[in-house]
Amino acid sequence: MRQGMERIPVVVAETHDEIARRIAGRIAEIVRARREAGRPAVLGLATGSTPIGIYRELIRLHREQGLGFSHVVTFNLDEYHPMAPDNLHSYHRFMRENFFDHVDIERRNVHIPRGDLPRAEVETHCRDLERAIEQAGGIDFQILGIGQTGHIGFNEPGSDAESRTRLVVLDTITRRSAAADFFGTENVPHEAITMGVSTILGAREIALVATGEHKAAIVKRAVEGEVDREVAATYLQRHANATVYLDEAAAAELTRRKTPWAVGEVEWTPGRTIEAVVWLSQVTGKSVLKLDELDYREHRLTSLLARYDSFADLNGFVFNALSAKIRGRGKLPQGRRIVLFSPHPDDDVISAGGVLRKLHQNRNEIVVAYQTSGNIAVFDHEVRRYLDFVRRAAADFDFGNERLPALIREVAEFLAAREPGEVDHASVLKLKRRIREVEAISAIETLRLRANQARFLDLPFYRTGQVRKDPIGERDVAIILELLEELRPEIVLVAGDLSDPHGTHRMCLEAVERALERYGGASPEVWYYRGAWQEWSIAEADILVPMSEEELRVKIAAIFKHQSQKDRAPFPGVDEREFWQRVEERNRGTAQLVDRLGLPEYFAMEALVVRKPAAPA
């Protein structure tokens, strides 16, 4: 059902699992109906992190409900070129590992563009794929993701509506977005084979799936904007049976979500009221207390105004609510048991360094729990540097044993021979883990915490040696739960952002939330901070922690201790600035907006959202 400004049906689900269940359920209906009709179901499949949940649910349906795939024909959207099918980054390998190896599909019914063909043979191969789709009777159901440029498949800006399967040159933004998977933009292929826009639109039914805050802006453009060849996803507006499936984060910029008063009736909760008035202040350029009746009426907020005796009363309510969010050190907890969960060994100082330092100054009992080792984000040259130091120090002080020279030689030979993206040897992974640990300790010591306040949990889901991780498992949850039961925290801080390009933050949040559901002690208050990619808005935030210029300097100094992540972070996403640069801009920007709203002026601010413990029954 279309809502607000949307030009295509949009379904917003609370969780990724709900999206996966709905789409997998629909696919199961098609597979069974086609089998009963005596013809194969033809599926168009996508790769990347977005559809993995769908494939896992289809595997579950196959194992638990007997959903058969022996009469299913599949066509994948795309493949990098050049790309060997057994390469770690190959979509052939991705599909085998994440779907085909777990169901009873016939290999002869699987069609994935070949990235290993000589260029001279690619055009013929593309025509063959088009012919195979036609001979199969067309695609019944097509799964799509959406890229940062709005591409579907690899139909980059400028793709024509009549385009068919072909070899394309990848956009710079697309290659940057893929840099995490390839351990650097320089390793990402420049070309790919992709289904064309016309090929995709030929499917009888289409589901485009997008999750995470980093997709919100392009989703809004695709769903609410005019059809534009610069944003291939807008072509879906022309399809009679296409639906967009979003999680809450990816839907955040849609008009019906961000400014619902612009499209219909609104339930004016206190939170929505604050959101609307902050928005009005920004669009008018006035501070909250200077907004007048005409401002509300001209911006479709008369229904909100009618709930108050006057615009002055409304302004006063919002001003006081915003003021109450600001908590300097004197308004922060003292003498409490606190655990801060950090997905990687730097998210603590990047996103919560200011509040962490103030909580420490307030004599709270703090433990910083690093959920993953972060070892895949360490460049090889860092390992070489540390090993050279060990070798030289061993010679200077005559320590070590016969194993040390052998280890140094073994690691050096591996690093010299490895291919980009190749999984590290176990000894290399351990060295990279230790590099991240000593950096993390140095960072919290900059904030005046002690080394023994750090815990390194090394959750199993992360130990793949690859960007792509295992699902959160029982052992991951058990490790978190054991820590909670040992420390009995009254406050827990967790990373609540969903824009981390490689998904680790989202998975770490899942592990904590699942552990808290099983936790038998008094429910702690949960504070959600946001990571290196985005900040809570002032309207969303429950706590705004001010920082002086000196406090921001100390926070940045702590970030600098993560030397392996400085100068050139391995996974920058589209934003290639260093983390400290993003932090400085974000924290100062939050304070500047607070100032423009007419509240007290501060140099910088961190924002947090708080979930209070449930009241006893």
Image: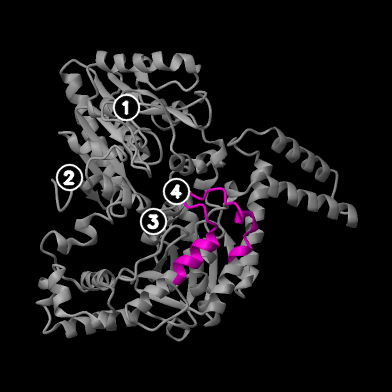
The segment highlighted magenta reads: 559-588
Would you say residue 217 sits in the magenta stretch?
no
Q: CA distance from mark 3 to mark 4?
A: 22 Å
Q: CA distance from mark 2 to mark 1?
A: 22 Å
Reading the chain from its start, which is encountered first: label 2 or label 1? 2
Q: CA distance from mark 3 to mark 1?
A: 41 Å
Would you say residue 573 sits in the magenta stretch?
yes
Which numbered circle lies on residue 7? 2
- At mark 2, the secondary structure is loop
> What residue sits right under mark 4 in the picture?
501
Reading the chain from its start, which is encountered first: label 2 or label 4? 2
> What residue sits right under mark 1 in the picture?
196
Image position of 481 (left or right of 260): right
Which numbered circle lies on residue 81? none
> Mark 2: which amino acid?
Arg
Crowding at dot 1, Cα within 10 Å, few <14 / some 14-19 / many 20+, comes out as: many
Residue 340 visible in rendering: no
Crowding at dot 2, Cα within 10 Å, few <14 / some 14-19 / many 20+, comes out as: some
Quick one: quadrant of the C terminus? bottom left
Reading the chain from its start, which is encountered first: label 3 or label 2? 2
